[in-house]
Image (cartoon, grey):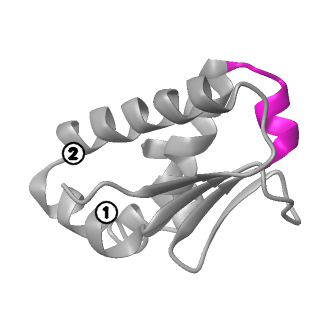
Amino acid sequence: MTMVKIEAMYVPWKEELTKFIEDLVRRLYDHLPSKFSRKMDKKIEGIVLGELCKSEYNYHKRKVYLSRKLLYERDPKKIAEVLFHEIGHPLLNDEFGIDDQISADFL
């Protein structure tokens, strides 16, 4: 696995959060079928925590962005749900012949 780079900008509990995100990504990667883990290596180069972005979270230019607002809530379940959803966009896009917004919810 090529570990994605995690960039933590101005976020609360930075070290804890970075370790939490790394653990989530590693566990997701380990449970993906090989087709999708290879796709993850190609499609996601980084996760950016706390950078100001137009929406609360998004996937853009091979990076997943999680906003400060989401991170300040300190809700691990919500952070995991959002992270997996955003990772799902590039992994599941066009896989099932349906919109990537819907398919990302499967992850």
Q: Is residue 47 magenta?
A: no
Counting residues from the start of the chain, the first of labels 2 and 1 encountered is: 2
Which circle marks residue 32 in the picture?
Answer: 2
Quarter assignment of residue 25: top left
Q: Quadrant of the C terminus?
A: top left
Percent x, y of residue 23: 38, 30
How far separated are the C-alphas under marks 2 and 1?
9 Å
Direction left: furthest residue:
34
Q: Is residue 73 magenta?
A: yes
- Kindly state the secondary structure of the residue where label 2 is placed: loop
Find disc 1 in the rendering and name its residue. Answer: 40
Report the amino acid beneath label 2.
Leu
Percent x, y of residue 24: 41, 32
Report the amino acid beneath label 1.
Met
Q: Quadrant of the N terminus?
A: bottom left
Direction bottom: furthest residue:
61
The residue drawn where x is 31% and y is 63% is 40
In the shown orientation, is residue 30 left or right of residue 55? Answer: left
Quarter assignment of residue 92: bottom left
In the shown orientation, is residue 34 left or right of residue 99? Answer: left
Q: Is residue 37 above or below residue 68?
A: below
Q: Nearest the camera: 105 or 59?
A: 59
Q: Nearest the camera: 43 or 52?
A: 52
In the shown orientation, is residue 81 left or right of residue 35? Answer: right
Q: Nearest the camera: 66 or 101?
A: 66
Q: Which span is picked out in magenta?
A: 67-75
